[in-house]
Structure formats: C-alpha cells, structure tokens
Image (cartoon, rainbow, N blue to C red):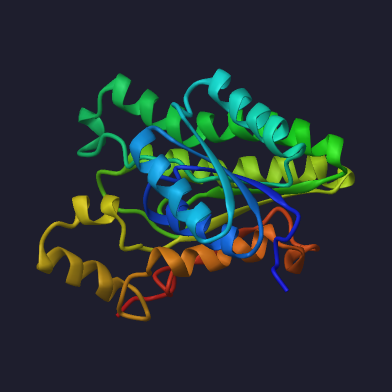
Amino acid sequence: MHRLSGKVALITGASSGIGHATALLFAAEGAKLIVGARRQAELDQLVAQIIAAGGEAVALAGDVRSEAYAQALVALAVERYGRLDIAFNNAGTLGEGGPSTEVSEPGWTDTLAINLSGAFLGAKHQIAQMLKNGGGSVIFTSTFVGHTFAFPGMAAYAASKSGLIGLTQALAAEYGPQQVRVNAVLPGAVDTDMYRDKNSTAEAQSFVSNLHALKRVATPEELARSVLYLASDDASFVTGTASLVDGGVSITRS
C-alpha cells in the first residue's frame, strides 16, 4: 500500500537535490504534488517525469522570500486538489560565507530571508490551510551545522538553519492540539549540486566524507526516505523534533 495515498503535498526547493528526490518519492507513494522552486524549466521536467510515471503534479515557480508566493502555492494546492496535507519547506541557500567580520549586511539578511523567513512564511499559510483539513505534517530542512557543531565562515547559514529548529518547536507546541505535526530534518552532507559547488575537488569531498561515521555522504534519495517517514502516518506521534539524518557526523571525532 502506498504510504501517502490520498494526500496532497507541497514541496519547495524541488528543482534539484533533496527536494527533487523527495518529490519523486512522494509521488511514487501516492501523493498529489505541488512543486515549487525558482527555476520553471527544471520544475516542468520534474512534473513531466512524475506524470509519465503515473503520478499527479503541478508546478509554480517563484521566490520563497515572497509571502505572496507562499500564499499562491497553497492556493494552487486547494484549487487543483482541494486540500493540503503535507508541506516540505526545503528551499535554501548556503548564503554569503567567509570571515564573519566581513559578511555584508545584505548577505546576512538574504540568507535569513531565504532559509528562515521563507520557511516561516510558507508554514504560516500551509498550517492555516491544514487547520481546515483537521491536521497535517509540516517539515523543514535544517542541518547539523549550528546544531551539533559548525564550520568557520558559515555564520549566516548556521544561524538561519538553527533558527528553523526553534521555529519547529514553537509551531509544534502551538498547533499540536489541532493535529498539525511540525518537524525538522537535519541532514549531514548530501551529494547535491550545492554540495559539489562548495566541495569542488576530490580532496575536499574526501575530507567531508571522512567527517561522517559512515565515511561517505548521503544521496538525496536517502534524505527523501526520512522526510517520507515524517510526512506519513508512520510518524503520527512525532512532532517538535530535530531529526538528525547525518551519517554520524555529529558524533564522529576520528
């Protein structure tokens, strides 16, 4: 039996990486999908792939920094499928890096706007709709960075992503009585375009792999399976968690 049969799911950052893999898995598990990202062409390819496999999906490109875009994604879910059950707020950026004393104010502000404020604006309208359905599941993509340890030169990223954990707990406590579950998934390194952009040499990739207890990085599909668990009724008593899916990077010192 498909784990998401009859469910309607919204995914941001769906054009590549974890979001793309999760969209394909959700569709295979029976969900009807609304997929969002900045790049229309990549979203169109994703929708075509889902439909070709017998699934249902619709795309809307936009910028998660815009509250109007958050509203439009939810409105599209209701217009096309009549409800919203699951939201995976996955869109994110590494943002401006480098020594923190040299990070620009626009670079700091933009990183928080995408990673933290964008996720809040999404959840604000997603939860409002889920309350009309009698509940739902909201999931954020956070990270171990800024939670279990951090790297130099990543202050904006660490602050924005760790902020999502506080947001997760606050929303879970606030809307648990209405059966809206809210959780965050905290990946270790994942083999995505973003990862390869930051770790472009074999030496850098080897260094990052060795930080993990499993001595490798994750595939996007491995993260997608953890997101599926949190989205599904298998996690019906799970809310307010910061769920590490990090290959042991948080506990490895060798």
Determine the residue positioned at 37% across, 69% down.
218
Q: Is residue 97 left or right of residue 227?
A: left
Quadrant the N terminus occupies: bottom right
Determine the residue positioned at 18% across, 72% down.
206
Residue 220: x, y in percent? 41, 63
Residue 89: x, y in percent? 55, 43
Determine the residue positioned at 52% across, 29% down.
117
Count the labels in the image: 0
Q: Is residue 117 above or below residue 237?
A: above
Q: Is residue 200 above or below residue 123?
A: below
Q: Quadrant of residue 185?
A: bottom right
Residue 160: x, y in percent? 45, 38
Determine the residue positioned at 22% across, 56% down.
196
Q: Is residue 39 visible?
A: no
Q: Is residue 236 left or right of residue 38?
A: right
Q: Is residue 183 left or right of residue 49?
A: right
Quadrant the C terminus occupies: bottom left
Residue 42: x, y in percent? 35, 42
Q: Quadrant of residue 158?
A: top left
Q: Is residue 7 visible?
A: yes
Of 221 and 254, the residue lying toward us: 221
Of 157 and 227, the residue lying toward us: 227
